Amino acid sequence: MKHITITIAWLLSLTVAAQSTSPDVIASSGEYYENANNSISYTLGEIAVETYSNGSNILTQGFQQPVSVAITGIDLDLLVYLEGPFSGSQMNTTLNSEGEIPLSQPYNTAPWNYSGTESVGSIPNSNVVDWVLIELRDAANAGAATPATTIARQAAFLLNDGSVVGLDGSNGACSIAAPPISNSLFVVVWHRNHLGILSANGLTGSGGTYSYDFSTAITQVYNGGAGYKEIATGIFGMVAGDADADGEINTADKTVWANQAGTKGYESADFNMNSQVNNPDKNDMWVPNRSYESQVPE
């Protein structure tokens, strides 16, 4: 008698208000079906004997991939300051008021190489200071939050009060599409001429929103003493002076400053972000900061 072996995988349905990727069955014969409540995948003559997972994707031996990868929205309520434009209790918005901030995210070049298409028809809020790049990492602890643990990246706007907001420029949570978190959620903040930082602690969600205030202590940043600083009494911020964005403030950044000195606009050596590259950028920012290095794990 001829036997046909059928391997069937029943899945629980995941209800999310976002997109997901459907499984594919790659075999000599088999199929995948789903409805609003359940899904089923099967192959003929190929028994599933083991499943492999990297946290985002699942592959079952037997040439079937029976689980959808859910992409959900993570709402972030972040507060972070840049040293360069900071004065008193907030940051200046000179680049904005003078029309120098680009309408498309500026992190599509090295070292970030971010391919996101975030753009606006006009800068949406007079309080916007600049673009920042937010990166989410899913790891057991901050030291283990290497680039391999990155689950999402998104460009956003930074307001003068330190709030990170979406493209509409409105105060409130910034939503980023990401898969479910397996370990703890850590946040990296990148800026084009300030040293990148990583949250020292995993973020805790409340009511669906993950909050983190980088400004309250140097210990809010991973290895903060080497790549973060107090920018006013009791207020901490990202270190200015990294003109070439290589994660170190050194003579190479001074060379960039020298090449741009006397220019006006959206320049990487404009450390105080007043749209002018001049001596205060070097003397007030680069000189006192030239021993700092980003501590974001690589």
Image (cartoon, rainbow, N blue to C red):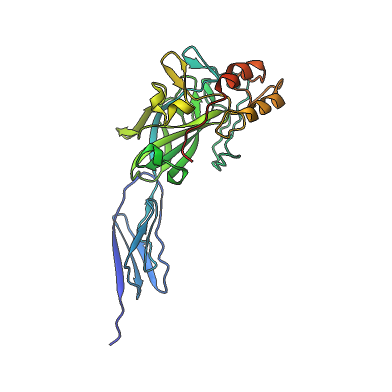
Kindly give the residue lying farthest to the front in the view shown.
Answer: 291
Q: Look at the picture and state if 96 lies above or below 38.
A: above
Q: Look at the picture and state if 125 lies above or below 105.
A: above
Looking at the image, which residue is at 39% across and 21% down? 216
Q: Look at the picture and state if 175 lies above or below 12.
A: above
Looking at the image, which residue is at 38% across and 34% down? 75
Q: Nearer the viewer, residue 124 or 48?
A: 48
What is the x, y in percent for residue 103?
59, 31
Q: Look at the picture and state if 187 lies above or below 270.
A: below
Horizontal side of residue 267 vs 117, given as left or right: right
Looking at the image, which residue is at 58% across and 39% down? 111
Report the number of numbered marks: 0
In the figure, residue 282 lies in which quadrant? top right
Kindly give the residue lying farthest to the bottom in the view shown.
Answer: 1
What is the x, y in percent for residue 255?
68, 28
Looking at the image, which residue is at 49% across and 30% down? 168
Q: Nearer the viewer, residue 100 or 279?
A: 279
What is the x, y in percent for residue 298?
49, 41
Query: Can residue 264 be spotted in the picture?
Result: yes
Query: Can residue 170 be spotted in the picture?
Result: no
**Quarter of the image where the N terminus is located:** bottom left
